[in-house]
Image (spheres, helix red, strand yellow):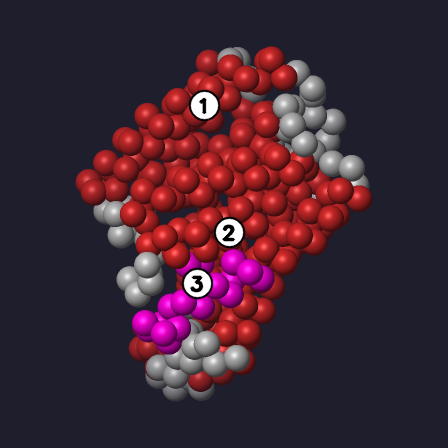
Amino acid sequence: MAQLENKPLASIRPLIIFLLLTIVFYCVGYWLIFRLERASPLMMSVGLAAVVTCFLFKRPLSSLGLKWGDNRYQWISFLVPLAIAMLSYLIIWGLGFAEFNSSFADTAREDYNLPGWSDTSIIAFHVLLTATFSLLLSIPSVFGEEIAWRGFLVGELSKLMSFGRVALISGVLWSAFHWPLMIKGFYGSGYTPLIFQISLFTLFIMSNSVIMTYLRYKTDSVWSAVLYHASSNIFVQKVFTPMTVVDQNSAWYVDEFGVVIPVVALLAALYFWRLAEKEAM
C-alpha cells in the first residue's frame, strides 16, 4: 500500500472499537437474515462498523481506499478468481472428481427463454451475462464487506505488522465471519462433515486474503478487493459449480467447501506471497 503510516499506538484503539462494533452489527445483520431473507444486511454490517469507527475517530472515508487505482491491477483482480475457478473445474472434470452437468444448458435455455439456442451459445451467453450484469448487481453487498476487511482492517493492521501477518489475520477474521452461517447450515454443502467444510473454506478464504491484500497494497484501493471478491463469488457460485454435478461423491472436491478450489487458490496465494517478499511489502 502506498506509504502507509507507522503509528502503532494510534491504530490499536480503532481496531478494538471496530471489532466490538463488528460483533454488535453482525448480530443485528444475522437477525435481519431471518426478517428479510437476504444476506445483504449481514454482509454490510461489517462495513457499517468500519464507517462508524472512522466517524468516531474523525477519519475521512477516503482512508478506506475509495480511489479507483491502477486499471491494470483492477483487471488482475477480476481475472485471477476466474483463472482459479476455471483451472479448478478443469481439474475436477478432467480427473473425474465430478461430471459436467449435462442438463445445465437445457435449464439455462428455459430460464432465459431462448429455446432455439445451441448448448455452446447458451452457455457462452450465461457466462457473459453473469460476468457483467450479475457481477455489477453483487457490487453493493460486496462493497459493504470489503470497505471493512480490505478497506479498514488491512489499512490499520499494516501500520502494526508485516504483509504476511496482515494477510493472515485479516483472512482469519474474514473466515470467522462466515462460520456461524456454516454451523447453522445456511452456507455450505449438505454432503460432507462440517469440520471438513470449515477447514477447506477457511483455507480458500485465507488464500484469497493473501492475494487481495497484495492487490490492496499495490493499488491503495479497496476496489481491487471488491472486484476480486465479486468475481470469485460469481464464477464459482453462478458459473462453474452449477455446471457441475454435485452429489455425495463429488462434494468432497467441488465448490468452496471441497478440496480442489482451496488448493488451487493456495498455490496462487503462494505466488503472490513471493511477489510481496520480492517487493519488500
Q: Name the residue under label 1.
A: 18
The image quadrant of residue 277 is: top right
Chief secondary structure of the magenta span? loop
Which region shows up in magenta? 245-264
Secondary-structure class at tag 1: helix
Give residue 182's position: percent from left, percent from top: 32, 49
Give residue 193's position: percent from left, percent from top: 32, 59
Q: Is residue 3 visible?
A: yes
Q: How packed is label 2: few (under 14 Cα within 10 Å), some, or many (20 or more)?
A: many
Name which of mark 3 and mark 2 comes first in the sequence: 2
- Pick the residue in front: 229 or 99: 99
Residue type at tag 2: Leu
- Pick the residue in front: 141 or 100: 100
Secondary-structure class at tag 2: helix
Name which of mark 1 and mark 2 comes first in the sequence: 1
Q: Name the residue under label 2.
A: 203
Q: Can residue 62 be seen in this view?
A: no
Between marks 1 and 3, how big is the CA–CA gap? 32 Å
Q: Which quadrant would the C terminus be assigned to in this image?
A: top right
Q: Mark 3 points at which residue?
A: 258
Between marks 1 and 2, how big is the CA–CA gap? 24 Å
